[in-house]
Amino acid sequence: MSVAEPRRIVLFRHAKADWPQVSDHERPLADRGRKEAAEAGRRLADTGVPFDLALCSTAVRTRETWKLAVQEFPQRPKTIYEERIYEASPGELIAVLNETPDDVQNILVIGHNPGIQGLADILAGTAEGDARDRMSRRGFPAAAFAILSFSGSWKSVEPGVGTLLDYWAPTE
């Protein structure tokens, strides 16, 4: 892959989680979350973006979200469960992205707020259509995702480098 070809980053917040008496890391999805994870997966598949790699937090709710969403994809990308995504700040998420090999063209990150929303805001130097307005108005509810593009190597991912191409949230 050429570093001159536009790359895609999808920032995907886990679906709605339940609140049983377990540690935060072990919280599972709620019934609504399971439905929304599958719907988000269908929406992501409909974008036609062929994902090479998925980086998923190790938390139960993110792993369950990914398991349900990826079933909707025509082809399953390589998946890495990354502990550093759990409770990560936007800067920590950028550091993880900067480690991505340049043969990866399109990546999906399944994580948590406020880091995922913060990263979408920080990376999006520009936006197409009304994507930024919709994201600003809705925030980043459970199962929402933002699609960004940028050109260059993964080591060049930094604030303002991307274009926000699309944004989706359940019930939008």
Image (cartoon, helix red, strand yellow):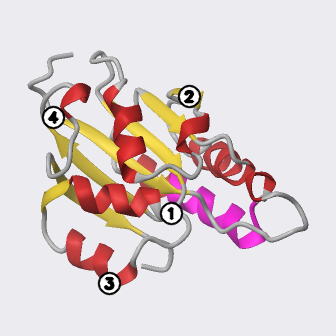
Q: Is residue 124 left or right of residue 23?
A: left
Span highlighted in magenta in the image: 29-41
Residue type, label 1: Asn
Residue type, label 3: Arg
Measured as percent of width and height from the top left, residue 60 is found at 74, 49
Residue type, label 2: Thr
The answer to which image quadrant residue 17 occupies is bottom right
The numbered mark, 2 or 1, whose residue comes first in the sequence reads 2
Marks 3/1: CA–CA distance: 16 Å
Marks 3/4: CA–CA distance: 27 Å
Residue identifier under label 4: 6
Q: Could you say whether the residue bearing mark 1 is in a helix, strand or loop?
A: loop
The residue sitting at the bottom extreme is: 137
Marks 4/1: CA–CA distance: 26 Å
Residue type, label 4: Pro
Marks 2/1: CA–CA distance: 20 Å
What's the mark number on residue 127?
none
Principal secondary structure, stretch drawn in magenta: helix
Residue identifier under label 3: 137
User: Do the CB atoms of the residues marked 3 and 1 lie less than 8 Å apart?
Assistant: no
In this view of the protein, which residue sits in the foreground, 98 or 147?
Answer: 98
Q: Is residue 60 left or right of residue 102?
A: right
Marks 2/4: CA–CA distance: 21 Å
